Each structure stands twice: as C-alpha cells, then as structure tokens.
Amino acid sequence: MPQRLPLAAPPVRKLPGSRRGGLPRLTSVLARRHRATVWLLLPLLLAAAACQRHTPSPASPAALSVEYSARGVIRELPATGARVVVEHDEIPGYMPKMTMPLEVRDSRELRELRVGDTITFQLAVTADSHWIHTLRKAAPAPIPALSAAAPAVAVPTQTELTFTNELGRAVTLEQFRGKALAITFIFTRCPIPDYCPRLSQNFAAALPQLAADRTLPTNWHFLSITIDPEFDTPAVLRAYGQRHHYDPAHWSFLTGAREQISDFAASFGLTLQRNGAQIDHNFRTVIVDPAGDVQMIFPISGNLTSALVTEMRKALQFKSNPDSPATQTTLP
C-alpha cells in the first residue's frame, strides 16, 4: 500500500587577425629596416611570447576558499568514507557551536583518530563546498556527549497543518492536494554551502527545467519549510527566496509553529536537536504525488537536481479525477 502524506516515511527505495603566432608579421616589418637587429631581438621576443602563453589565469572566485580555525570533539567516525561528525565549538565570525558532518578530503588524516577525540582543524569554505584539513589531536575539553535523537511522533492530519508563506499568507497542506510536491527542510542561517544552501540550489536549478517543459502539466510545487521559525519570518524567507530567484507560482517558503514543523519533519525521518540558535539536523527532500502519496525520499544533501527533475516528472504522471475539487486548488 502506498504511504499517505503525511504519515511516517518509508525507507528510501532508490536514489537516483595576425598571422600564426603574431611574430612572423612583426619580423617581416622589421626586416626591411634592421634585419640584423631583428635576429638579435628575436629570441627575446619569442621568450616573452612564451611567458605570455604560459601565464596561468587567476582562479575563479568560486574556487577561492576562506579558512577558519576550529576545535571540537569527534562524535561519529564512519568506517568508510571521508565524512566525520564533529561537535565543534563556536567558530568566531562564521557560525555558532553545533554538531554536523564535515568533509575530509584526505582520509589519511582520520587514521589515528577515534570517536571522542578532541581535535583542532582548519575549515575551508568556498561558494559551493566545504572541507576540513590539518586535523590534530588536542587536549580534551569538558564537552557533553550528544544526546540521543527523540523518536518520531505522530503527525497531525493534513487539515491541521497550517503554515505562513513568505508573502505572509496562511497556507495549509490541503491546498496543495492535486499537485506534485517536492518538500525540503532548511534554515536561512545555515552556514555550510553544501547543506541547506545546496538544497535550495537544487530547487532553484530544477524549477526552470520543469517550467520550460511544455509537455508537463503545471500542477507541481516546491515547498521549503524552515526549521528555524523564530528567526525565519516571512520577510526573511521572501528575501532568501529572491536570492535564489524563486517563482512564487511554483515555489513557496513556509514557516509556522516550531512544534508543528518539528513533528511534520520527523514524520519523514528528519531529526532535529536545538540548543538556542543552534540546530543540528539531517536531510530530507520528499517527493509527493498529486494524490498525497510519498513517492521518494532523498536522505542526503548534494546536487540532486537531475534526480529531483526525474522524480517530479514521474509524480506528474499520476492521473486524478479532473472533476475532483482537489485538482483545482491554488495558492492563496
């Protein structure tokens, strides 16, 4: 039996001009006057041209990284792969204390490390990625262990789930019945470029692809739901959406009561741990067909644009009763 939105999420089933060289023309002109001088100068000219040809171009802005010194405790150390979960201290000028998985490009740096080790490291951040390096053991500090995640709880019925969108308007999930949905959970203060910002970039890249396909029906919508509702007001969400060139006809940013959002997110397996302004969380992007059945759950971040477009196309193959009021619902 297919799962009905918004019951507990099933396990993931799949993922898815001059002459050549410039110098001959120059030498031919000079030869008519001072041929001997040209022969003396020619090696210098060739050397200069070679230097110009081999001068490396400057790195693009996206390739440049900013470095931060950091300290924390290893909380998870997978047997394979190069992503380590670190409970790190505040990184001044970048982000508060929190626990998160961090990429390690050189897995050899993890060989002598164990869960519970206190480490110092360098965090490198570019416009679209991050990694840590120069991991070193340090003297332990009294940092408490990460508490166990709370179990998923029952989710209210759809008619009880009311949000406020980025335009300040009340929105219920029932209003989206009859639409194929992609739902993800973000917060605008998320500092790691390949976490929440990457999830939003997936939507931003998939939206024009779906909109440009005239063979597709138009009953589809993206929902980005904040897990930081106290900070992410409608005005903040609208500014965030504008930075991602969103189209409100097909993409909404929702906020609401913290407990309701947490319960709804937990129904898909998203776990949250809060400590003031700090939010530790995993990832969920959910595809729902127009009948309200969960079709796919992506439990990762990263570039999911192609897979997202593919799953939305599949969801739009759902055939509903054209006379049903649900297929006629629109945004408020």
Image (cartoon, grey):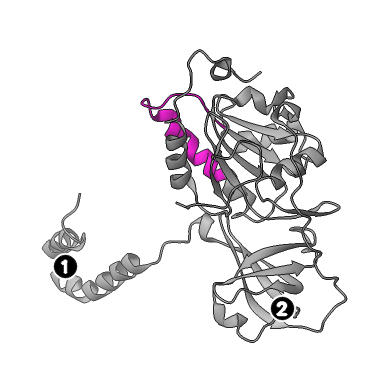
- Residue located beneath label 2 in the image: 115
Give me the residue at 68% from left, 38% from top: 225
Q: Is residue 239 visible?
A: yes
Q: Residue at x 81, y 84 (%)?
A: 139
Quadrant of res 6:
top right
The mark that comes first in sequence, 2 or 1, is: 1
In the rendered image, residue 194 lying in the magenta stretch gets the answer: no
Q: Is residue 241 left or right of residue 88?
A: left
The image quadrant that residue 97 belongs to is bottom right
Instruction: Pick the residue in front: 126 or 43.
Output: 126
Front position in the image: 313 or 44? 313
Front residue of this view, candidates 117 and 44: 117
Image side of residue 297 versus residue 209, left or right: right
Percent across and percent down for residue 280 are 74, 56
- Asked if residue 215 lies in the magenta stretch, the reply is yes
Q: How many marks?
A: 2
**In the rendering, at what x and y percent does residue 61 appear?**
53, 55
Name the residue carrying label 1: 34
- Decide if residue 157 is on the left or right side of residue 309: right
Question: Is label 2 in a helix, a strand or a loop?
Answer: loop
Per the image, label 1 sits on a secondary structure element best described as: helix
Q: Position of residue 60 (x, y in %)?
A: 48, 57
